Amino acid sequence: MKRFAGAVFILAALIGSASGADMALKAPPPAAPTWTGLYAGVNVGYGWGDSRTDIAGSGGITTFQGIVAGFTGFPSNFAFTDSASARLNGLTGGGQIGYNYQLNQGWVVGVEADLQAAGQSGNNEFSDQFSTPVCGNAVGRNPPVCAGTTPLVATAATGYEAKIDGFATVRGRVGYLIADQVMLYGTGGLAYGRVEINGNASIPSAAITGGPTTFVPSAGTFDVAKNNLGYSIGGGVEGRTFAWLPPNWTWKAEYLYLDLESLDSGTSFSSVLPAGRGGPVISPLTGTVALHSHFIDNIVRVGLNYKFGN
């Protein structure tokens, strides 16, 4: 009986040892790395944008005194409008910091802020012809009145350069894991950028047709910069799938659309008759040019993120 009990004990010990070894061989695989945590990184990319500019010019001659004493003429006003776009292209680069929270095996939410340097610029020009009547003959009544007009013809030339000098965004992110190590995401939020426009407006020549009256060319300059608040929206892909990436590092490829709102600028000009010009007294041809520019931008970029902790 004692021999039987001893045999049973030895058999039970062998079975237990075998079961333990089997369990060790079939230990569960380690859990997939979580996306939850704080991260920071760098990026580089390319931007192509647009500065849509509307221009409005106005002005005139207030006095044209003819051969009749006491006649001071009448206002001769002009106005013109035009629109054009400057294409803004250049490299971008900067850094980002953010936080992800993995809801489950499929979804990740988070927030990200980034600060970017940008060298995007472009230029364009306007050429707008205008005409206004001026009094060419007056009759001596009380008061004197204009008995005939002649047109003044001129062309306003306005050239400008538009720039996006840099921008920053604060955006939410919502991602879906198409694999444990790859996430597709959408993003959107606020954008803050520095925009600039500079240039000049000139009247190369202005002449009253039918006579020798020609005004001296004139020009005015403008240079305005502003930090604007707008919005951004986009999406991208982020992952850990490259073998050369160290632990806790991810790569990303991203597209962003930015609307950086508008900037107003303008200048004035005053064109006069040459010195020593005789004949009728004509006041300067004066006016203003106002510009309203709206800035948008498209960014494609790649980057690396480092996740702090496990």
Image (cartoon, rainbow, N blue to C red):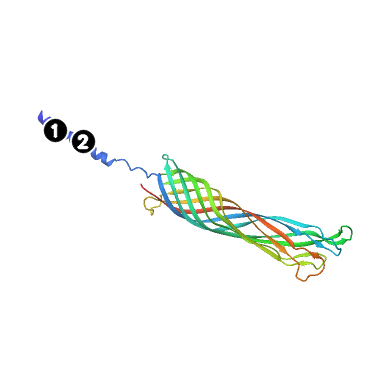
Circle 2 is placed at which residue position? 16
Q: Nearer the viewer, residue 39 or 229?
A: 229
| Residue 191 horizontal/vertical position (percent) | 53, 49
Q: The N terminus appears in which quarter of the rendering?
A: top left
- Quadrant of the rendered structure where residue 284 is? bottom right
Task: Report the side of 20 relative to 230 (left or right).
Answer: left
| Residue 32 horizontal/vertical position (percent) | 37, 44
Q: Nearer the viewer, mark 2 or mark 1?
A: 2
| Residue 74 horizontal/vertical position (percent) | 81, 58
Q: Nearer the viewer, residue 269 or 39?
A: 269
In the image, residue 117 sits, relative to residue 109, either above or below, namely below
Question: Label 2 to label 1, Cα distance in Å?
Answer: 14 Å
Task: Report the side of 273 relative to 180 (left or right).
Answer: right
Q: Are marks 2 and 1 in contact (CB under 8 Å)?
A: no
In the image, residue 303 sits, relative to residue 13, either above or below, namely below
Circle 1 is placed at which residue position? 7
Q: Secondary structure at mark 1?
A: helix
Q: Residue at x 48, y 51 (%)?
A: 114
| Residue 115 horizontal/vertical position (percent) | 49, 53
Three-letter amino acid code at the position of disc 1:
Ala
